[in-house]
């Protein structure tokens, strides 16, 4: 039972354009969401997070949107750069779960020069 | 601040053996969580330690265990290794407020375990 799903295994975008990565969740108890970027042979790197009391959070080129009614979140990267090419994971946590993160399966982003 | 460090980075073991992996969190971080990453199952939560106590546990057999020391460093142990235990084991650290609210978790580079 996958509680966090990233339905697109891969995404290809031209440099300078917007990258939109999507994530869906099923557990209503989730109230904190995070995005991580991962390069091969490295641990995930934290990008941005959002609490369920918000619907948007921005940090530089990265913006996360949360639609609680649809149980959907998305990560926007604008403008996309070749160095953004990596696997992106969304993760979710619930207040009763402490620091336990439930991860999606990841989306491989390729930004072409 | 130095990041999360994990040792060793690579490990090869045979079935039936046991293994101990080590994790040093970011200075000041008191919560340490462990995750297993495999191609088939993705990133899965193993357990979390805070103040030397296991706070949460994922759905893994009892062969997987861990502990945390007073300096917040953590170890995880896998006994009676199986081929399916081959994976990247990741450690993550975070601050944990007294109210129990969670913060961003920062991951180490991982230990790549191969079981032959």
Image (cartoon, coloured by chain):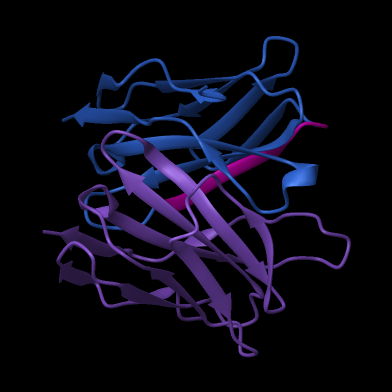
Does the magenta segment cover residue A49?
yes
Dividing the picture into quarters, in which one does residue A113 lie? top left
Which region of the structure is painted magenta? A45-53
As drawn, the chain in purple is B
Q: Residue lying furthest top in this view?
A: A70
As drawn, the chain in blue is A
Does the magenta segment cover residue B41?
no
Q: In this view, does B57 lie above or below A50?
A: below
Q: Is residue B71 above or below residue B5?
A: below
In the rendered structure, the answer to whether residue B90 lies left or right of residue A63 reads left
Find residue A20 and report its horizontal and vertical position in percent: 43, 20
In the rendered structure, the answer to whether residue A38 lies left or right of residue A47 reads left
Q: Which residue is drawn at 77% across and 31% down?
A: A52
Dividing the picture into quarters, in which one does residue B101 lie? bottom right
For the residue pair A56 and A2, the one nearer the viewer reads as A2
Find residue A95 and report its horizontal and vertical position in percent: 79, 44
Main SS, magenta residues: strand
In the rendered structure, the answer to whether residue A69 lies left or right of residue A49 reads right
Q: Which residue is drawn at 75% across and 11% down?
A: A69
For the residue pair A95 and A53, the one nearer the viewer reads as A95
Q: In this view, does B47 lie above or below B17?
A: above
Q: Which residue is drawn at 14% across and 66% down?
A: B14
Q: Residue at x 58, y 83 (%)?
A: B27
Find residue B48 and report its horizontal and vertical position in percent: 61, 61
Dividing the picture into quarters, in which one does residue B3 lie? bottom left
Q: Residue lying furthest right in this view?
A: B99
- Quarter of the image with the C terminus of chain B is bottom left
Q: Is residue B114 above or below residue A69?
A: below
């Amino acid at each position: 039972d996958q509680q966090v799903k990233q339905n697109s295994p891969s995404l290809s975008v031209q440099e300078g354009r917007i990258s939109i990565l999507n994530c869906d969740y099923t557990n209503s108890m989730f109230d904190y969401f995070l995005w991580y970027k991962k390069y091969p042979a490295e641990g995930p790197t934290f990008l941005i997070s959002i609490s369920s009391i918000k619907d948007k959070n921005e940090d530089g080129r990265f913006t996360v949107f949360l639609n609680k009614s649809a149980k959907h979140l998305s990560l926007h990267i604008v403008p996309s750069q070749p160095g953004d090419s990596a696997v992106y994971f969304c993760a979710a946590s619930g207040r009763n779960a402490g620091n336990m993160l439930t991860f999606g399966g990841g989306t491989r982003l390729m930004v072409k020069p | 601040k130095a990041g999360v460090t994990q040792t060793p980075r690579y490990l090869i073991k045979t079935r039936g053996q046991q293994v101990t992996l080590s994790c040093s969190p970011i200075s000041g971080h008191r919560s340490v969580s462990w995750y297993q990453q495999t191609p088939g199952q993705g990133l899965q939560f193993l357990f979390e330690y805070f103040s030397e106590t296991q706070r949460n546990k994922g759905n893994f057999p009892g062969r997987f265990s861990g502990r945390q020391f007073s300096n917040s460093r953590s170890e995880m142990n896998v006994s009676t290794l199986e081929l399916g235990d081959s994976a990247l084991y990741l450690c993550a650290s975070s601050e944990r407020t007294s109210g129990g609210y969670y913060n961003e978790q920062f991951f180490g580079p991982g230990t790549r375990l191969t079981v032959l």
